[in-house]
Amino acid sequence: MARCEICGKEKVFSLQVSHSHRKSSRSWKPNLRSVKAVVDGSPKKLHVCSRCLRSGLVERA
């Protein structure tokens, strides 16, 4: 579910490195917001990342 419905940004996996250089896996999730947006002339609820909201890719209802 952690995916932006506009740009497709999703969860990313990588390694967390401690001060002693021990590595463990960790994930980063996008900053998603549940927004009512206008899609094809009617309001619809979308999960949109904050970058898409700020850049104006979503027209809010």
Image: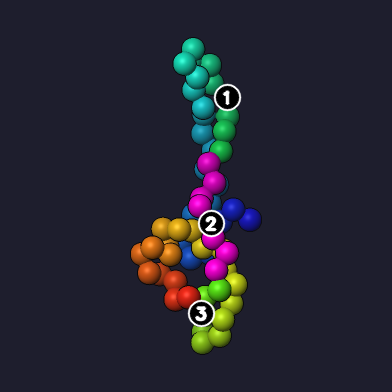
Q: CA distance from mark 2 to mark 3?
A: 17 Å
Q: Nearer the viewer, residue 2 or 53?
A: 53
Residue type highlighted by circle 3: Ala
Earlier along the polypeptide chain: callout 1 or callout 2?
A: 1
Dot 3: element: loop
Residue ranking furthest to the right: 1
Q: Which residues are magenta?
A: 28-35
Residue type highlighted by circle 1: Ser
Q: Residues within 10 Å of mark 1 (few under 14, many from 20)?
A: few
Q: Can residue 8 be seen by looking at this rendering?
A: no
- Pointer 1 and pointer 2: residues touching (CB < 8 Å)? no
For image coordinates 51% across by 84% down, the residue present is: 40
Report the mark closest to the observer, 1 or 2.
2
Q: Which residue is mark 1?
A: 24
Q: Which residue is mark 2?
A: 32
Q: Which residue is mark 3?
A: 61
